[in-house]
């Protein structure tokens, strides 16, 4: 792809906006369409575009496999931690109302944290899958 200068310039301009859109989908997923899964796929798509245009090895230096595996684990732990925090707060597993003094605030906080955990996990796993297949010959 080194010969395609226009593609490299356009993708450098688009990747920040793709990441920004992924952040928008992540943060507004509890009010409208979207959420953690969609935002994770959008984030991963930005990095995969980077890997396609600027070579997989360059992308692996930007987001190494060890960092992605750690991020996937952190996302799962965040989801499980929200469930356990609800139990510690006196509710059932994943009962968000027990996370705050007001059940409405607890529901909003719980949904936001769960969606964040899903987004981190999905983005990391999608990039791990791409790296695994892109490295094969």
Image: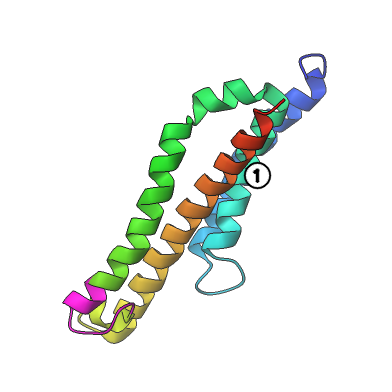
Tell me which colouring the rendered structure shows. Answer: rainbow
Task: Classify 10 Å Cα crowding around label 1: few (below 14), some (14-19), many (20 and above).
Answer: many
Q: Main secondary structure of the magenta part?
A: loop
Q: Is residue 23 magenta?
A: no
Question: Can the viewer see residue 92 in this picture?
Answer: yes
> Is the C terminus in the top left, top right, bottom left or bottom right quadrant?
top right
Corner quadrant of residue 75: bottom left
Q: Is residue 74 left or right of residue 59?
A: left
Q: Nearer the viewer, residue 99 or 75?
A: 75
Image position, residue 35 (x, y; %):
54, 65
Q: Nearer the viewer, residue 36 or 27?
A: 36
Image position, residue 77 (x, y; %):
33, 57
Q: Is residue 97 left or right of residue 46?
A: left
Q: Judging from the image, what secondary structure is the residue with disc 1 in?
A: helix
Image position, residue 132 (x, y; %):
60, 35
Question: Can the viewer see residue 21 in this picture?
Answer: no
- At 33% from the left and 65% from the top, the residue drawn is 80
In this picture, which residue range is highlighted in magenta? Answer: 85-94
> Is the N terminus in the top left, top right, bottom left or bottom right quadrant?
top right
Q: Which residue is mark 1?
A: 45
Corner quadrant of residue 48: top right
- At 60% from the left and 21% from the top, the residue drawn is 57
- The mark tally for this picture is 1
């Amino acid at each position: 792809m080194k010969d395609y200068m226009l593609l490299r310039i356009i993708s450098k301009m688009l990747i920040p906006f793709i990441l920004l859109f992924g952040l928008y989908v992540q943060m507004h997923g509890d009010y409208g369409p979207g959420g953690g899964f969609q935002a994770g796929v959008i984030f991963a798509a930005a990095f995969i575009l980077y890997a396609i245009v600027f070579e997989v090895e360059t992308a692996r230096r930007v987001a190494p496999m060890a960092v992605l595996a750690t991020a996937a684990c952190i996302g799962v732990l965040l989801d499980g931690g929200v469930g356990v925090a609800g139990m510690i707060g006196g509710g059932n597993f994943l009962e968000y109302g027990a996370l705050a003094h007001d059940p409405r605030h607890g529901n909003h906080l719980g949904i936001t944290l769960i969606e964040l955990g899903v987004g981190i996990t999905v983005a990391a796993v999608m990039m791990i899958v791409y790296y695994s297949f892109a490295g094969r010959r």
